[in-house]
Amino acid sequence: MDWGRAKSVLILAFLLLNIVLAYQLWTDIREQLNANVNLKDLQPETLSVMQQKNIQLGATASIPDETPKLKDLTYRITALPEDDEREELPEPVDSKIIFSEKELLKQLGGIIPDLELYAFDPAASEDGVFVLYRMVDGRPMYDVELKLYYRNQKIEAYSQKRVELSQTDEAKEQTVLPASRAIGPLITNYLPNGTTIKEIRLGYHGQIFDSETQVAAPAWRVLPEEGKPYFVHAISGEVFSEKDHAQTGEDDREEGERTGQE
């Protein structure tokens, strides 16, 4: 046996192992630093509750620092599909076009009305369904969805809610609450133990009423890794969940408070 060569191989192996371990340590430290940056603007009380309830930001989640001036949107619903109502496409198309706005419009722009007004939301999509939202000045209307149903890498059908925005001078622009402040009550009173926050994003949301005219307010959407999204009114700070289209958020509050006491 060539002991000199064997010794060199062992030294090289240990060197490579040290490099791998050092890289892993650096990655862990970097992730921790990024997490600290994301959480630095939260109130100490909120951070304490997060620790007690084991609530975390996901690996790709961050707390936005934008505070633009926005106003309520007034709109009229022009198309509202029933639950599970689908429009089958004349011919299925490749699902990969969802990742290219140009290709999406080319393939489906002549079939789906106003497709250019909607934008893909990867965070809200799930297996078998691509979710797109009606956009206003680059921000999503979370109550106005376009769903593309796919199977075997082919988009086969869609369902679409369509609205017509109304021009009104009644709504006044107001500076929105910072996300770091807005999500504090949500974390304290609503989110269950062990929640991992997938995304926090500013858009528009409002309860749907049996009326021709609807209103959507600026809102922070907080999307957990599991379960339905929560919304925080970006002006008043009121918290409500997706099911608040039909009822208030009182049940969510009670559930969250009970969970937090466990």
Image (cartoon, rainbow, N blue to C red):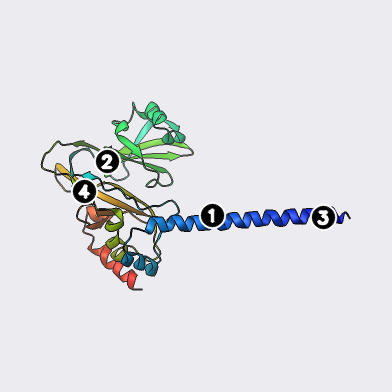
Q: Could you say which is closer to the camera, residue 113 or residue 262?
A: 262
> In the rendered view of the protein, which quadrant contains the C terminus?
bottom left
Q: Which mark is residue 175?
A: 4
Q: Is residue 147 visible?
A: yes
> In the rendered view of the protein, which quadrant contains the N terminus?
bottom right
Is 3 rendered above or below residue 107? below
Q: Residues within 10 Å of mark 3 (few under 14, many from 20)?
A: few
Instruction: Give the residue type at disc 1.
Output: Thr
Sequence-first disc among 1 and 2: 1
**Residue at 58% over, 56% down:** 24
Q: Which residue is mark 3?
A: 6
Instruction: Give the residue type at disc 3.
Output: Ala
Sequence-first disc among 4 and 3: 3
Q: Which mark is residue 151?
A: none
Q: Which residue is mark 1?
A: 27
Displayed quadrant of residue 143: top left
**Residue sticking out furthest to the bottom:** 262
Sequence-first disc among 1 and 4: 1
Residue 29 percent across, percent down from the top left: 51, 58
Asked if labels 3 and 4 touch by Cβ distance under 8 angstroms, the answer is: no
**Residue at 36% over, 34% down:** 88
